[in-house]
Amino acid sequence: MAEVVSKDNFEELVIKSEKPVLLDFWASWCGPCQSQTPVIEEFSKENPDIFVGKVNVDTEPELAMKYKVMSIPTLIVIKNGEKVASKVGFSTKEELKKLVEG
């Protein structure tokens, strides 16, 4: 399951992660985000070697601003504490895998 990421646990879960990180920036009112959620959950279960987190842009505006999230869903890949890739809009599991693998 994707974990909820907030500014309070961001350092520990994302920056210090030894695994590649896939962050899903979303909001409850966003239709495409609702379609993305089951794909993210399935991807998370199938890829235990990748940390998958969800960032609600309404409750975590600081994180959205930090990564310049202007549209949602936005998916961001972080490796060794650094942003290495991002994609805006709905993604399939195959696209998620390619995004993380770079």
Image: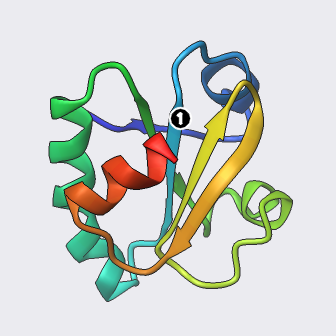
The amino acid type, in three-letter code, at marker 1 is Val
Instruction: Specify the quadrant of the image occupied by residue 62.
Output: bottom right
Residue 2 vs 34, above or below: the answer is above
Residue 17 lies, in percent from the top left, at 61, 18
Residue 79 lies, in percent from the top left, at 65, 31
Q: In the image as oriented, which residue stretches furthest toward the front? A: 102
Residue identified by numbered label 1: 21
Can residue 38 be seen in this snapshot? yes
- In the rendered structure, the answer to whether residue 31 lies left or right of residue 50 reads left
Instruction: Specify the quadrant of the image occupied by residue 56.
Output: bottom right
The foreground one among 91 and 23 is: 91
Can residue 54 be seen in this snapshot? no
The residue under the point 70% across, 73% down is: 69
The foreground one among 97 and 71 is: 97
- In the rendered structure, the answer to whether residue 58 lies left or right of residue 11 reads left
The residue under the point 23% across, 66% down is: 92
Residue 72 vs 56, above or below: the answer is below
Residue 95 lies, in percent from the top left, at 31, 62
The residue under the point 71% across, 16% down is: 16
The foreground one among 87 and 44 is: 87
- In the rendered structure, the answer to whether residue 87 lies left or right of residue 40 reads right
- In the rendered structure, the answer to whether residue 49 lies left or right of residue 57 reads left
Crowding near pointer 1: few (<14 within 10 Å), some, many (20+)?
A: many
Label 1 sits on a secondary structure element that is: strand
Residue 5 lies, in percent from the top left, at 56, 39
